Image: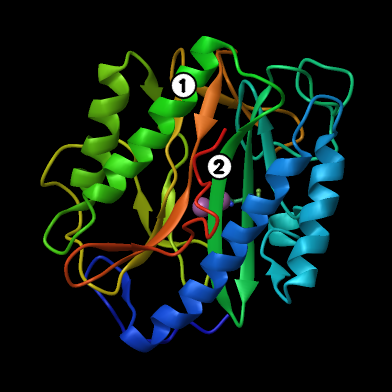
Amino acid sequence: MDDTRGRVTRDGIRIYEDADLEGMRAAGRIAAEILDEVGALVKPGATTGQIDDFIREAVARKGAVSATIGYKGYQHASCISVNHVVCHGIPGAKIPGRSSDVLQETDILNIDVTVIVDGWFGDSSRMYVAGTAKPFADRLIRVTHEALMRGIAAVKPGNTFGDIGHAIQSFVEANRMSVVRDFCGHGLGRVFHAPPNVLHYGRPGTGAVLEEGMFFTIEPMVNLGRPETRILSDDWTAITRDRSLSAQYEHSVGVTATGCEIFTASPAGKFFSP
Ligand code: MF3
Ligand code: CO
Ligand code: CO
């Protein structure tokens, strides 16, 4: 991928130009539209394989390309992470602890889609529920969404990446839940994963300073129990070590002169509609 636009900061973070916003808007919008559409498929009895098939077709129908198919050998158009799966759940594979990929009543799941449109990357994920969530699962989902939005609220020139992490961590821990440390957000633009690592924990005023023109994801994973994770023998699926439930929301954002633009906002206004 060509990634030669704008300039790069001392911290290795690319600063894009105003003309580049249109590309990120187009890519982010398509990722968001797909996440809007896929909600209708999530119900007890549906399989994660069916959901991924729909996403694969939706990506093509919109004239986009899947960023995940072929990425480090990954073969799917989405990651679907059910219950105690933290991230990188493989659609069509057995749900960990189960004998199939069939969703059951009260399952909570994250669906993560990344598309490439004219060379620009749009990366977003949301939580969905098969049927109705149990109250503690519903609370986890609400806290995780609010944590992401508080992180986004800290995005403006002059703030630091530590301010984003602190906004997320302090809210999550005040709710007696834990922030996963083993995965982070990332710069993106003309590439999928670029500097910086966007940590979802941290101390105010630490880390690189945010500048207009930085594009990155914020994608906190929050556990009801302990923060530690483990990768299964498929080399992808990350689960909570204590098997507690985990949730995640992800937006792709850009730093503007006064704050933040969310590239993956839901056109239908249903980013949070678990
Ligand atoms: N979309 C994920 C992220 O938020 C990355 C998925 S890589 C895959 O960065 F290969 F697992 F699909
Ligand atoms: Co991401
Ligand atoms: Co993602």
Q: Marks 1 and 2, Cα distance to the nearest angstrom?
A: 13 Å
Q: Position of residue 185 (x, y in %)?
A: 42, 49
Q: Is residue 109 visible?
A: yes
Judged left or right of residue 86, residue 253 is left
Judged left or right of residue 216, residue 260 is left
Q: Position of residue 24 (x, y in %)?
A: 47, 74
Instruction: Classify residue 179 by image quadrant.
Output: top left
Q: Which residue is mark 1?
A: 140
Q: Amino acid at mark 2?
A: Arg
Q: Amino acid at mark 1?
A: Leu
Quarter of the image with the C terminus is top right
**Image point (53%, 46%), residue name:** 270
Instruction: Classify residue 219 by image quadrant.
Output: top left
Q: Nearer the viewer, residue 203 or 256?
A: 256
Q: Position of residue 152 (x, y in %)?
A: 30, 49
Q: Is the C-beta of the residue carrying label 2 under 8 Å from the nearest atom of ligand 3?
A: no
Judged left or right of residue 42, residue 18 is left
Q: Nearer the viewer, residue 205 or 232?
A: 205
Quarter of the image with the N terminus is bottom right
Identify whether 171 is placed above or below 149: above
**Image point (79%, 70%), residue name:** 60
Q: Which residue is mark 2?
A: 126
Identify the residue at the far front of this view: 268
Lower position in the chain sequence, tag 1 or tag 2: 2
Q: Is residue 190 visible?
A: no
Q: Secondary structure at mark 2?
A: strand
Q: Residues within 10 Å of mark 2 (few under 14, many from 20)?
A: many
Identify whether 20 is placed above or below 212: below
Q: Residues within 10 Å of mark 1 (few under 14, many from 20)?
A: many
Q: Is the C-beta of the residue carrying label 1 under 8 Å from the nearest atom of ligand 3?
A: no
Q: Position of residue 4 (x, y in %)?
A: 42, 86
